[in-house]
Image (cartoon, grey):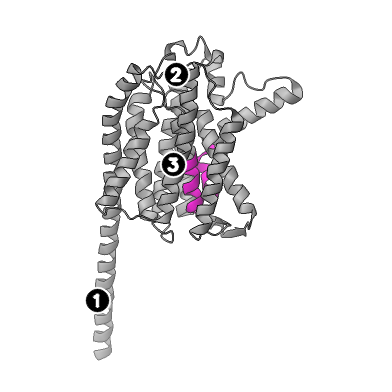
Amino acid sequence: MLNDCKITLNSVQTNIKNGILNLHLGDDFVLVLTKAMLALMIGFVLSIIFGLVFIPIMKKKKVKQTVSVFLRGQHDKKQGTPTMGGFIFIIPTIITVIILLLTDKIEWSNNLFIIMFVFLSYGLIGFIDDMLIIKRGHNEGLTEFQKIVGQLAIALVTFYLLMKSGHDPVLNIHSLGIKIDMAWFYGIFLLFILVASSNAVNITDGLDGLAGGLSLIVFLALGLITWNTGWLTGNESIAVFCFILVGSLLGFLFFNTNPAKIFMGDVGSLSLGATMAVISVLTSHEVTFIILAGVFIIETLVCIIQMASIMIRNKKVFLMTPLHHHYEKLGWEERDIVKTFWVVGLLLAMAGIMFAVWI
């Protein structure tokens, strides 16, 4: 009888402990959700306010986009639309991060510094390119060689910062339990992923809202994945950064969806591509990033296939590249192309989240 009582008492104590644990887990989930929503909301509101001020200034200063000669006829209405709209999500994101740091809502870490460094540095290259295009009055800013040199220089500094902060040169595929020690080759791998990603987003930025919407989806997925990487120093702060950027991109899309009141410009596209790449590296989800950035990768591969076909066969495979222009030539409406690409991007993001977190 006494033993039965002890067993019952132990069961009650166990249930109480489990109940308290579940309560704590529930509280943590609510706190995570609240932080994410707060970050997203602040980024969104600030980007809307900034956009309402920034766009009239750009129009007054005649900071306008010149439509490529290859798109004349289809994109004539876009001629003279202000560019460098990337500032509408870059500046509010920076301001929001500073506010949250000063109010101790997020913590400063070497990893967050690396992300901010990449975010601003690649944006600077894009800014210089945009300014040269505006000054010259045609779609020729920095040469491809100058862009690549600048991107590689920043990627080298990023590699140094990563190694100095203790990041292991290991390709870790968590879902499959595979670890590959890349040693010195990891530096080359990092250079490739940063340069390739920044240029992939830049290539995709050809229709109203296309690159911005796809980037929003990728950063939303990266925010959820990063919050799950508890082993990473400052993972919650990095996740909050992702959600801030999601909010800022949402505000930017308010002005950038068809018909766009402002274009992203290289200042935005290069910054977004490199930043999503470095977050995937920091969280050791480089393979997952291939899934998340699937649309960007396909757009880039289509360009490579087209160039190779022209060089080898002297024939085109696609009517025009990148891929979104191919569909334009087929007669698709711009909005339909963007919506279709967004849906594909969202499906890939969901698959990436399952691969990284659930499977």
Q: Residue at point 54% right, 34% down?
A: 200
Q: Is residue 84 above or below residue 349?
A: above
The image shows residue 142 at horizontal and vertical percentages of 55, 27
How crowded pointer 2 is (Cα within 10 Å; few <14, some 14-19, many 20+) is rated as many
Residue 303 left/right relative to 324: right
Q: Is residue 282 magenta?
A: yes
Callout 2: SS: loop
Q: What number is the disc on residue 12? A: 1
The image shows residue 302 at horizontal and vertical percentages of 61, 29
Q: CA distance from mark 1 to mark 3?
A: 52 Å
Return the residue nearer the eye: 5 or 200: 200
Please state which amino acid type lies under the numbered disc 3.
Answer: Phe
Q: Quadrant of residue 329?
A: top right
How crowded pointer 3 is (Cα within 10 Å; few <14, some 14-19, many 20+) is rated as many
Q: Do we see residue 340 in this rendering?
A: yes
Q: Quadrant of residue 51?
A: top left
The image shows residue 43 at horizontal and vertical percentages of 30, 39
Please state which amino acid type lies under the numbered disc 1.
Answer: Val
Part of the protein shown in magenta: 274-294
Q: Residue at point 34% right, 41% down?
A: 94
Q: Quadrant of the N terminus?
A: bottom left
Callout 3: SS: helix
Q: Which residue is mark 3?
A: 119
- Between circles 2 and 1, the one closer to the viewer is 2
Q: Which residue is mark 2?
A: 65
- Between circles 1 and 3, the one closer to the viewer is 3
Please state which amino acid type lies under the numbered disc 2.
Answer: Gln
Q: Residue at point 51% right, 58% down?
A: 164
Toward the top, the furthest residue is 73
